[in-house]
Image: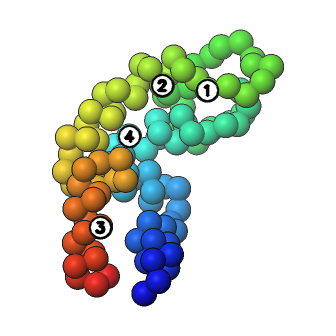
């Protein structure tokens, strides 16, 4: 199989955002990760599961990354995700092992 086709087959996973977040971060952190990735303007309605993570601040004139929320919440989430071997994600060491296993099995 040509290397480009193999790369696309092994590196590209087409699935919903929810499935991707659950697979890469675990379902317990889904709402916070979705909120972090969400780029709707301040004041837009969010899903009920995200509401506990929203805090009131002055309206932004431009779209910006919420660095305070990221700094506060992301480190513990990342630590939990990295230590959970049942979560296999591209930024973890177990991803490489999974790709090797798939190649060996001819998946």
- Dot 3 corresponds to which residue? 99
**Residue 69 higher or lower than 81, as above or below:** above
Instruction: Give the alpha-carbon distance from disc 2 to disc 3, as whole Å.
Output: 30 Å
17 left or right, relative to 91: right
Which residue is label 2 attached to? 70
Q: Are marks 2 and 3 in contact (CB under 8 Å)?
A: no
Q: Are marks 3 and 4 in contact (CB under 8 Å)?
A: no
Q: Quadrant where the C terminus lies?
A: bottom left
Q: Which residue is more in the foreground, 74 or 2?
A: 2
- Residue 88 x/y as whole percent: 29, 56
**Closer to the N terminus: mark 2 or mark 4?**
4
C-alpha distance separating marks 2 and 4: 13 Å
Q: Which residue is mark 1?
A: 65
Q: Quadrant of residue 59?
A: top right
Q: Are marks 1 and 3 in contact (CB under 8 Å)?
A: no
Residue drawn at (75%, 19%), measured in percent from left and top?
A: 60
Q: Real-space Cα distance between discs 1 and 4?
A: 18 Å
Foreground residue among 92 and 16:
92
Can residue 52 be spotted in the picture? yes
């Amino acid at each position: 199989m040509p290397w480009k086709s193999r790369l696309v087959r092994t590196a590209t996973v087409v699935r919903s955002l929810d499935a991707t977040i659950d697979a890469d971060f675990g379902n317990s952190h889904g709402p916070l990760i979705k909120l972090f990735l969400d780029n709707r303007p301040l004041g837009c309605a969010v899903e009920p599961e995200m509401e506990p993570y929203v805090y009131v601040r002055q309206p932004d004139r431009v779209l910006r990354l919420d660095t305070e929320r990221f700094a506060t919440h992301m480190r513990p989430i990342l630590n939990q995700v990295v230590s959970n071997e049942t979560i296999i994600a591209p930024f973890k060491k177990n991803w490489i092992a999974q790709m090797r296993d798939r190649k060996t099995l001819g998946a």
